[in-house]
Image: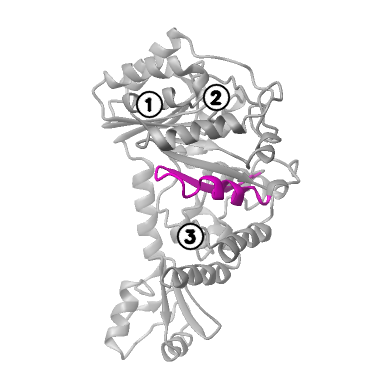
Amino acid sequence: MKIWSKYNTLFTRESVYLFYNSLSNAFVELSKDYYDQLMQYRPGEPVDIADKELGAQLIRMKALVDDDEYEIRKIRFTNTARRFGKDSLSLTINPTLACNFRCPYCFEEGHPVTRMTDETEDKVVKFISGFDPKRLSVTWFGGEPLLEFNRIKSLTEKFKSLGIPYHASIITNGYLLNEETARQFAGLNISSAQVTLDGVGAAHDCRRFLKGGKPTFDTIYRNLQAIGEHVPDLRVSIRVNIDKDNIDSFIDVYKLLGNKYPNIRVIPAFVSDVDGEGHLPCVMNVDEKFAYLRRLFHEHNLEFNNFYPDYVRQECAVRNPLGIVIGPEGELYKCWNDVAKPDKVYGNVDGGITNEKVLYDYLTKADPFDDDRCRACLLLPVCAGGCPYARIIDMDKKTNKACPLNVTNLADYLWEHYLCKKSRKG
């Protein structure tokens, strides 16, 4: 006989009866009779449902299971298999740590200005050749990677000569991403770019300015317009970093560019202080973030899948031995948050492993399936533990910054998701 899963949750709002299960990430509306019936069951209890159609549906949704622990072991196996998959080599390459901006919240502040040399470039190509992957993907990062656009071009030509299926993306501040540069991306297998705008006009310029303090918005905006009009195959995500100091900026950017070009989308992102000690007082807390997301939906009819649990079922590439960040001097990191931190270098493209602790911490430490807090959490089946970088910090500092926003007050988030879906149906 099947048991009632502990990963079920039922709740009601405004005479609507709702049911969610995180093993399958299923969410359905119930009749009051069904709701009252299901509310009688308790986690781990054997359940015999006379209504065969209802019983079959609950089994498909994993509301009724043989054993919750068995279901979690299956998920753990899937995650582990993906974590150590060997088909794809996923690299983040920093051709330089130099940047033409001096943003106050960026990790670049105070880092050395280093650039990749021809010698290091050749070592990087040799390093990649040693893996013999079936696929190669590269994210160009920095510093500002377009300061070393010629290095990107020369590395790309060598990557393509390896005969491995290859694609790339780039994270750039957008200042140098003019039409001429963007047109060259197709030949470099760069299909997508992320650009940050923290507002419109002065709202952006007070946060993202050139080293000398000069504004950047007008130049970036002209570049984005040119890409939208003349380089339609390049997908551009405009990231708006949101905190208490620019609470209205996302809406301003969305109104300006959100629906203007098919290849450009505007996405919200909250400024975080994951590894800090509260040094960024502008960072929103979880309640403020939820209130902000509700405001986007209720006042502006905007929703970016932030309410519903994200069905991850796989972890960040830092958990995979073939997920590697390469610095401009050939140094190796696991996470791009660690770039330019000497104590986080775990090796070099030509010298093997030099710091096993850093490497194996990222590969194995803070496993959510070994964490009592995670194992007790309703969202473990869908969340996969969140960001490994944040999880390791959480373990050391007894915090919970890796957790998704909807882990707290899940019913509130699900209700907002329900309202979103209802509004889309008219």
Q: Can I make out residue 327 in this image?
A: no
Residue occupying the point 63% across, 26% down: 101
Give whichever of discs 2 and 1 has the lower sequence position.
Answer: 2
Instruction: Report x, y in % for residue 203.
Output: 68, 41
Give whichever of discs 2 and 3 has the lower sequence position.
Answer: 2
Q: Which quadrant of the structure image shows residue 30? A: bottom left
| Residue range of the region highlighted in magenta in the rendering | 247-272
- Image quarter where the C terminus lies is bottom left
The answer to whether residue 252 is magenta is yes
Q: Can I make out residue 288 in this image?
A: yes
Pick out the residue farthest to the top.
119
- Image quarter where the N terminus lies is bottom left
Labels 2 & 3 near each other (Cβ < 8 A): no
Q: Which residue is mark 3?
A: 380
Task: State the SS at label 2.
Answer: loop
Amino acid identity at mark 1: Arg
Q: Which quadrant of the structure image shows residue 108? A: top right
Task: State the SS at label 1.
Answer: helix
Amino acid identity at mark 2: Glu
Labels 2 & 1 near each other (Cβ < 8 A): no
Apparent side of residue 138 relative to residue 197 in the rendered image (left or right): left
Tag on residue 183? 1
Q: Residues within 10 Å of mark 3 (few under 14, many from 20)?
A: many
The answer to whether residue 2 is magenta is no
Q: Which residue is mark 2?
A: 144
The label nearer to you, 1 versus 3, is: 1
Instruction: State whether residue 96 is above or below residue 57.
Output: above
Disc 2 from disc 3: Cα separation: 36 Å
Amino acid identity at mark 3: Leu
Instruction: Report x, y in % for residue 117.
Output: 48, 10
Instruction: Report x, y in % for residue 55.
Output: 31, 82
- Between 375 and 405, the one nearer to me in the picture: 405
